[in-house]
Amino acid sequence: MSYAIIRNIKYKRENLKGIYRHNERKNKNYSNKNIDSIKSYLNYSLKDCKFTYEKEFEKLRKECNLKGQVKVVSNIACEYIITSDKDFFESIGEQETKRYFETAYRFVCNYKNLGEQYILSAKVHIDEETPHMHLVFIPVVHTTDKKGNSIDEIACSEFWKEKDSYRRLQDAFYEYMVSNNFSLERGTPSERVHLSVEDYKKITNFENAKTVLQDIKFEIPNVPSIKDFGKLVRNRDEKIQELIINPKDKMIQDLQEKNSLLTYTLERQIKTVDKAVKYEKEKKSILAENTELKEKYENIETIYSAKLKEEIKEIEKKYENRIYELENENNFLRKIINTLHKTIDKFIHWVCLKFSVSEEDEFIRNFEFENDTYLNPEKQIEYEEELEHYNEFEI
C-alpha cells in the first residue's frame, strides 16, 4: 500500500532565493542527479509565480495588508512537499496523478483556513524519479487586533503552535485524500529536527567537550610484576595472577578501548562543528557581498528609473505641445472653410440677382454639370478619389 506524504519546511527570507531557483527550474545545472532536464518541460504550475518568492511575498504583504513583525530571524514562508511513491503514480496514470496534486492543492487552500491568495507558488515536478509538488505559502493566521478588528497576520510560530501540529497535518491530509477516492495509507510524520550550529553546540556541550578532550591523557598504569612480590608470595603466583592481575589487566584494556572510542567520537564532533563554523562564516560573508551588490544595483535601477521617467515626461510634453499646435491649426482651417462656404453662397446669390436668374439651385446644377465640378468640397473630394481609382483600374 502507498502512503499519502506531506512534509513541511520553514524558511527565512534568506532561503527564498535558493528554493525559488530550484522549484521554478531557473538554474542551468543541478547537483541533484535525479533531475532529468530533458523532461523539465513536463513540469507545470497549479499556482504560477510571476516574480521571485521574495517579491511575491512583499507584493502580497502590501496588497493584503498583512500584519506581524518580519525580522531577519523570522520564518516568513513554509513549503509543503507533497508526493507518494513511484509505483503509486505509475499505477494511477497521468490524469489521476494530475488530479492527486489538484486535490492536494485544494486541501492546502482550506487547511487552517489559509486561503489560496497566500500561496506563493505550487509547482509539480515530473522531471525527477517520483512526481511531487513544491507548494510555498505564507503562514498567515486570521486573528484580531487590540481593538477587536479582524486582521491577517504573518505568524509562523502561531500557525504551527500545537505540539502535535505535524501529526494533525498528516491526519487531515490523509483523510482528505482518501475522501477524494485515493487508495492510500497514512504517512508517518518525521521526527528529525534540523539544528543550527549554535543549537548543536549547546546540545552537545561542545565547548566543554573540546576542553575535556584536550586535557585527557590515556596511560595504562604499571602493573606490578609477579616477581616484585618476592618471597612473600612465592607459592601463590598462580592464584594472584588468576584473581588479581588478569582481571585488572582486562579492565584496563577495556577502559583503553572505550576511551579510544570516546576520543575518536569527540574528535569527529569537534571537526564537524569547526567545519560548520567555517562554512557559516563563509555563508555570512557571501550573503553580505550579495546584499551589497543588491543595494548597488537597486540604486542604479532607481537612478535609471528616475532618468527614464524624466525623459518620458519631456517626450510627453513635446507631443502635448505639438498636439496643441495642430488643434489650433485645425480650428483655424475649419474657420477658413466655413467662411469660404458662406462666401460662395453669397456669391451665387449675388450672381443670380445680377443676371436675373430665378432658380439658384438650377444655376448651381448647370455650373457643376458644365464644369464637371461640385461646389460642395466633400462631394468634390469623393468624386476626384473615385475618378483617380477608376483611372488606375483602366491603366
Image (cartoon, rainbow, N blue to C red):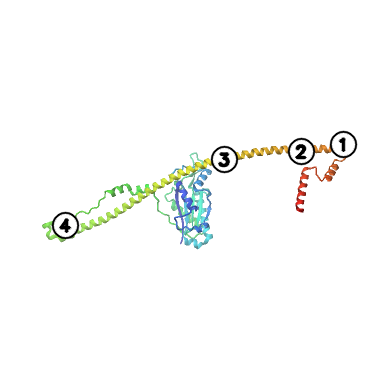
Vertically, is 93 above or below 309? below
Mark 1 or 2 closer to N-term? 2
Give the residue displayed 53% in from the left and 60% down from the top. Answer: 94
Label 1, label 2: how far apart the Cα atoms are:
24 Å
Residue that mark 3 sits on:
309
Q: Residue furthest bottom?
A: 91
- Residue highlighted by disc 4: 225
In the drawing, what numbered circle is on residue 338?
2
Q: Earlier in the sequence, mark 4 or mark 3?
A: 4
Q: Is mark 3 on a helix, strand or loop?
A: helix
Circle 1: residue type: Lys
What is the three-letter code of the residue carrying label 2?
Asn
Residue plotted at (58% across, 40% down) = 311
**Left or right: 248, with 339 as reference point:** left
The Cα atoms of the two marked residues, 4 and 3, are separated by: 97 Å
Q: Specify which label sits upstream in the sequence, 3 or 2.
A: 3
Q: How far apart are marks 3 and 1 (CA)?
A: 67 Å
Which amino acid, by three-letter code, is at mark 4? Ser
Q: Which residue does the numbered mark 1 point to in the structure image?
A: 354
Which label sits in the foreground, 2 or 4?
2
The answer to whether residue 76 is above or below residue 83 is above
Taking the spot 48% from the left edge, 42% from the top edge, the residue there is 296
Dot 2 or dot 4, earlier in sequence:
4
Does residue 388 appear in the picture of this structure? yes
Nearer to us: label 1 or label 2: 1
Residue situated in front as seen by the camera: 323 or 372: 372
Distance between the alpha carbons at the discs numbered 2 and 4: 138 Å
